[in-house]
Image: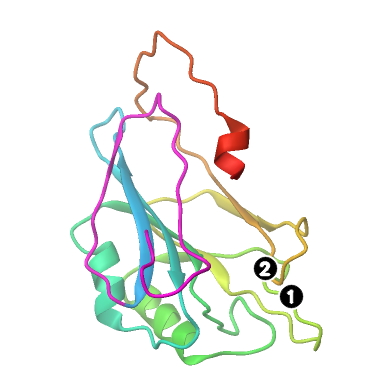
Amino acid sequence: MDRSTYAGGGTALLVRNSLPHHATPFQTSIIERTAITLERSNKASITIASVYKSPRKPIEKSELQNLFTNRRDVLVIGDLNAKHHTWNPTGNNRQGNIIHEYARKNNLKIYVPNQATRITHRFNNAIIDLCISKGIDNITSESIPALSSDHNPVLFTVEINDLQRNNIDTFQFTKWNTFQS
């Protein structure tokens, strides 16, 4: 999602060209998102959203409803700045309480790594990056201490083996220098 108000952050998804997909719009004003829908061989699509919610803005249940309602299989993955004692050993915040309660009432699953995803120098590291799943199980996650940042990259691995594949007759190579600039 392109941010027009201030620099930094943002969301993104990378999708293999051989997987049939399309951009998926969501009505959200607080949660920044980039979303796609993947087509599966059983014709039941899966929607994946990469999300970010600023710690300064309160989350609303209506925002969560817009992400999950009228969709069978959904993955919402990213930095929601949400803390809850069920996944964050250092305590709760309002966002975490709202997300935990919404997930519990709507039979959603929350996946988080065992290690902190936000690192501070004040010994209050936190797990604020998570995956909220509807209709999809068998998800693992790992916080990877690989960057010189206050946030670790988080790897969510999802086992989905019934995705359709497009036939591609040509190869495309990424121009990494152009991508990096």
Residue 135 at what x, y percent from top left?
A: 35, 53
Residue 37 image offset from top left, x and y in percent: 30, 44
Magenta stretch, overall SS? loop
In contact (CB < 8 Å): disc 1 and disc 2: yes
Number of residues whose C-alpha sits closer than 10 Å to that of mark 1, classed few (under 14), some (14–19) or many (20 or more): some
Label 2 SS: loop
Residue located beneath label 2 in the image: 151
Q: Residue at the top extreme? A: 169
Alpha carbons under labels 1 and 2: distance apart: 6 Å
Q: Residue at x 45, y 85 (%)?
A: 95
* As drawn, 181 above or below 49: above
Amino acid at dot 2? His
**What is the three-letter code of the residue carrying label 1?**
Ile
Quarter of the rendering occupied by the C terminus: top right
- The image quadrant that residue 103 belongs to is bottom left
Residues drawn in magenta: 1-29
* Residue behind mark 1: 119
Left or right: where 29 falls relative to 100: left
Of residues 180 and 173, the one drawn nearer to the viewer in this rendering:
180
